[in-house]
């Protein structure tokens, strides 16, 4: 059956949206692999927050570094959980793509249409608008779903990028606090040795 130009365009748009749908499915792999690593880093930093808790609060370099570290850990938690929420919403709201009727359904539909119309050109003229409408309806439904999923994954990836930066800065701050604590404990032990002698 020869198809009109409008049906060919609708068919191409449908196949384009189905290809985009498959690409969006493939894009779900990266956040699934990265989110557990961020959660592990977050748990490590929370454990270090408890270990580094200052015994006495004063405006010393150690306490200021600890406060900066705590702020970075809270920000990291917010962005990791935000990215995780966006990813889980994408998975939770996952729906199958809208497909055209199965080949058997299409064949039955064509046979039913052909039963009443003996002339092939009349049959083509009768079936063409319905076929085009099916392609357009399926492409539109898949397009809307693709747009929603693409937007959610965009924000998820953006939050993961911010999480990378926050993890790097929190790691630098962690080493700074650790170093300052070692220096303070070393100075405190030297001052007790000096006062004892």
Image (tube, rainbow, N blue to C red):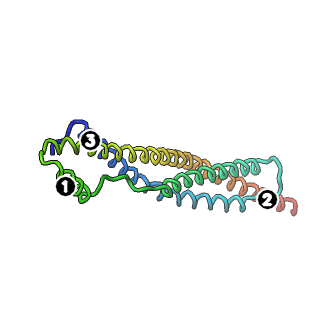
Image marks 2 and 3: residues in contact by CB distance under 8 Å? no
Residue 129 is marked as: 3
CA gap, disc 3 and disc 1: 16 Å
- Please name the residue that numbered disc 1 is placed on: 111
Q: Residue furthest front?
A: 116
Which part of the image, by quadrant, shows the C terminus? bottom right
Alpha carbon of mark 2 to alpha carbon of mark 3: how far? 90 Å
**Mark seen at residue 190:** 2
Q: Is residue 55 left or right of residue 52?
A: right
* Picture layout, residue 144 above or below residue 46: above
Residue 108 is situated, as x and y percent measured from the top left of the image, at 23, 57
Nearest to N terminus: mark 3 or mark 1: 1
State how far apart marks 1 and 2 are (Cα): 96 Å
Residue located 20% across and 38% down the image: 4
Which residue corresponds to the image point at 14% horizontal and 41% vertical from the top-left?
A: 121
Q: Is residue 189 left or right of residue 84?
A: right
Identify the secondary structure beneath mark 3.
helix
Give the mark toward the camera: 1 or 2: 1
In-front residue for pair 182/48: 48
Q: Is residue 67 left or right of residue 85?
A: right
């Amino acid at each position: 059956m020869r198809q009109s130009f409008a049906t060919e365009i609708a068919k191409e748009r449908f196949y384009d949206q189905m290809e985009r749908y498959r690409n969006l499915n493939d894009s779900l792999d990266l956040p699934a692999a990265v989110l557990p690593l961020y959660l592990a880093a977050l748990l490590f930093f929370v454990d270090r927050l408890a270990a580094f808790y200052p015994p006495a609060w004063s405006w010393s370099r150690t306490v200021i570094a600890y406060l900066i570290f705590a702020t970075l850990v809270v920000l990291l938690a917010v962005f990791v959980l935000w990215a995780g929420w966006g990813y889980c919403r994408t998975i939770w709201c996952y729906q199958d793509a809208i497909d055209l009727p199965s080949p058997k359904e299409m064949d039955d539909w064509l046979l039913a249409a052909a039963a009443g119309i003996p002339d092939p050109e009349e049959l083509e003229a009768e079936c063409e608008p319905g076929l085009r409408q099916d392609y357009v309806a399926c492409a539109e439904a898949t397009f809307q779903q693709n747009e929603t999923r693409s937007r959610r994954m965009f924000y998820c990836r953006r939050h993961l990028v911010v999480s990378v930066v926050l993890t790097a800065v929190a790691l630098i701050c962690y080493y700074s606090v650790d170093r300052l604590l070692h220096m303070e404990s070393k100075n405190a032990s030297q001052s007790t040795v000096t006062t004892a002698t």
